[in-house]
Amino acid sequence: MAHRGMPFRTLVPARLDRLPWSPFHWKVVIALGITWVIDGLEVTLTGAISGVLRSEATLHFTSGEIGQIASFYVIGAVAGALLFGHLTDLMGRKKLFFITLAVYLSGTFLTAFSWDLWSFIAFRLITGAGIGGEYSAINSAVDELIPARVRGQIDLIVNGSYWLGAAVGALGTLVLLDPHVFPVDIGWRVGFGIGACIGLFILFYRKSIPESPRWLMTHGREEEAEEVVKAIEAEIEERTGKPLPLPVVEIAIHPGREVNLRTVAKAVFGRYRRRSVLCLALMISQSFLYNAIFFTYSLVLITFYRVPESETGLYLLPFAISNFLGPLLLGRLFDTVGRRQLISATYLLSALLLLLTGWLFVNRMLSAVGQTVFWSFIFFFASCAASSAYLTVSEIFPLEIRALSIALFFSIGSAAGGVAAPWLFGVLIGTASRLNVAYGYMAASALMIAAAIIEAIYGVKAERVPLERVAEPLSTEA
């Protein structure tokens, strides 16, 4: 809760933005971004085992039930994002780092002990709630601690690091799902357990990450904000042996102004309503695309290409690598060429490539390898598009409601695009009709094209611009 006090002027944002890249920034990226690596590993395992879970030797799920499980995971993420997003703005970024990660790891660990459909659904619901909260807390903190000149690139890479975990998960399934190594009903359980155990180390590493000075200053904790920034500056000056340049942009803060749902609604649906339309378009379209294809990719390989269940992870490996290379290689352009140009381009290219893939798929012109190659091309760009959606939401609303704004649009986008997509594609694949699946690809492409157009119209010029200029804090003096 904010502490009421006298207005004050501060250089905290300017001091953070003028910092050179340092080991402190690497520590932030690793401590916060590694969650996406673990999530990528765990969700990849979930997608890869969808074929195994249909076996009579395991839990004997249908294709529709597997899609249902994925949908409940997204429902959990929606609920968790809204709850923990509000708490992140209220209690601070750092406290929620530990709470959301603990919830996430608990759900992942419990999934390993699922015994039927509803236990699996319940544990995936808990896992989703934790990861939904992580989206709000982590994206808020990364944007507030990373200098403005590289904010876009770093945010994209952090979100894209999910695919490093996906690549590891893809390789891991070759062992975990090999019946010669583990019994059919044991390997996938071991995978979830390993992911949860690895995540425990993150809890300890995050202790070294400070609370966001930007959050502290808007909650009237000026002295604490100053202490955090001074410690970061001292560490950097000691390493470089050079004094830092003087900050020049000062802002005024009126601490203690109440922020409630009415305040949020007034900002999101009033002053920033065009930005809200933009965020809805970006989040819904990328969520539908990713959840539709990623949660059911192994079903496509098994159903239409007769790929053995234990080998589907091998086909995911290039797909995952391409998803990470996109933000890594193109991320810098989001800070130099510009947000609007790159976001529109990546959404549009993803849509056009997906349409081409659907046409080739219907006409039986792709093998399992060919399908994987085209998916890799699509998601080289789609990964940038998806990460830029989270970047957009996290930087174009005022600081006091940043986490809740991320949660709100993540939730709406996931509910509209993510809950229905896995179930829908599970049903379409279950018909064993290539044309039906292609209709699903066409729907995803149409949403991505619409988002590209809306970005071209409403996109915000946020590259290399301080957060306080992109969206003035609610507590800033006019």
Image (cartoon, rainbow, N blue to C red):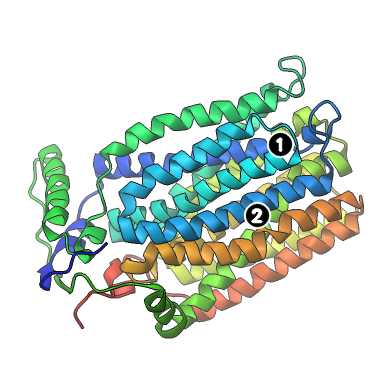
Image point 51% across, 52% down: which residue?
132
Q: Is residue 139 left or right of residue 305?
A: left
Residue where numbered disc 2 is placed: 290
Q: Is residue 208 above or below residue 328?
A: above
Q: Is residue 240 above or below residue 261?
A: above
- Residue 177 coordinates in the image, percent (x, y): 72, 25
Q: How many marks?
A: 2
Q: Is residue 453 above or below residue 126?
A: below
Q: Is residue 51 above or below residue 279?
A: above
Q: Amino acid at mark 2?
A: Tyr
Residues 408 and 246: in front is: 408
Image point 38% across, 57% down: which residue?
87
Q: Is residue 330 left or right of residue 235?
A: right
Residue where numbered disc 1 is placed: 48
Question: Marks 1/2: CA distance?
Answer: 15 Å
Quick one: quadrant of the C terminus? bottom left
Q: Amino acid at mark 1?
A: Ala
Image point 40% across, 29% down: which residue?
201
- Mark yes or no: residue 252 visible: yes
Badge 1: how crowded within 10 Å, few (<14), some, or many (20+)? many
Residues 194 and 470: in front is: 194
Q: Indicate the secondary structure of the residue bearing disc 1.
A: helix
Location of residue 14 (image quadrant):
bottom left
Q: Looking at the image, which residue sits at the far top?
A: 180
- Residue 334 coordinates in the image, percent (x, y): 43, 62
Q: Is residue 431 left or right of residue 73?
A: right
